[in-house]
Amino acid sequence: MESKRQQKFAGVLQEELAAIFQREGAAYLPNTLVTITKVRVSPDLAVAKVYLSFLNTNNTTLSVAEVNSHASEIRYKLGARIRHQARVVPTLTFFVDDTNEYVEHMDKLFDKISKERKETDEEAE
């Protein structure tokens, strides 16, 4: 369970990182829209796990690897933006947020179950 302090700081980081990716995201991933879906911060606020969602990309693993290769540059830009709000600029690690894929998978499963139920109901009549 994250503390209020962690949640507030994560919100600030998410907002500032979104602005960075909106302005300069094309330099890291051309023709790809990057969304920061979630930020988790360690209790000492020194490490941040940033979850990204991608649009217009074929290989999300490669996209995350590309963003992670620019993590120090992104951290520097983040530090310039939050220097008056935080003592320490956290170390950033980027991950793929696969929530959308999970939701699609669950929707397919529910559709399959409902079709099977309809078929068994029709056979029973």
Image (cartoon, rainbow, N blue to C red):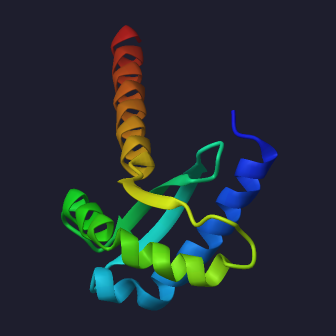
Residue 25: percent from left, percent from top: 39, 83
- Can you name the residue that lies furthest to the front here? 87
Left or right: where does residue 87 sit relative to residue 23?
right
Instruction: Please state the horizontal and vertical placement of residue 52, each as a whole percent of the image.
Output: 43, 61
Q: Which residue is drawn at 65% across and 58% down?
A: 10
Tell me the residue at 39%/41% (across/down).
102
**Residue 115 as seen in the image, left or right of residue 82:** left
Name the foreground residue: 91 vs 96.
Answer: 91
Residue 32 vs residue 3: left or right?
A: left
Q: Residue reaching furthest top?
A: 124
Q: Can residue 18 be seen in this view?
A: no
Q: Residue at x 32, y 79 (%)?
A: 32
Q: Position of residue 83 (x, y in %)?
A: 67, 78
Task: Write down the quadrant of residue 15 in the picture.
Answer: bottom right
Quarter holding the N terminus is top right
Q: In this view, does 63 lie to the left or right of 12?
A: left
Which one is in front, 72 or 96? Answer: 72
- The quarter holding residue 92 reads bottom left
Is residue 64 visible to us here?
yes
Q: Is residue 114 above or below residue 33?
A: above
* The C terminus lies in quadrant: top left
User: Measured along the vertical axis of the image, is residue 47 above or below residue 76?
Assistant: above
Q: Position of residue 18 (x, y in %)?
A: 55, 75
Image point 55% across, 61% down: which residue? 90
Vertical position of residue 48 compared to residue 23: above or below: above
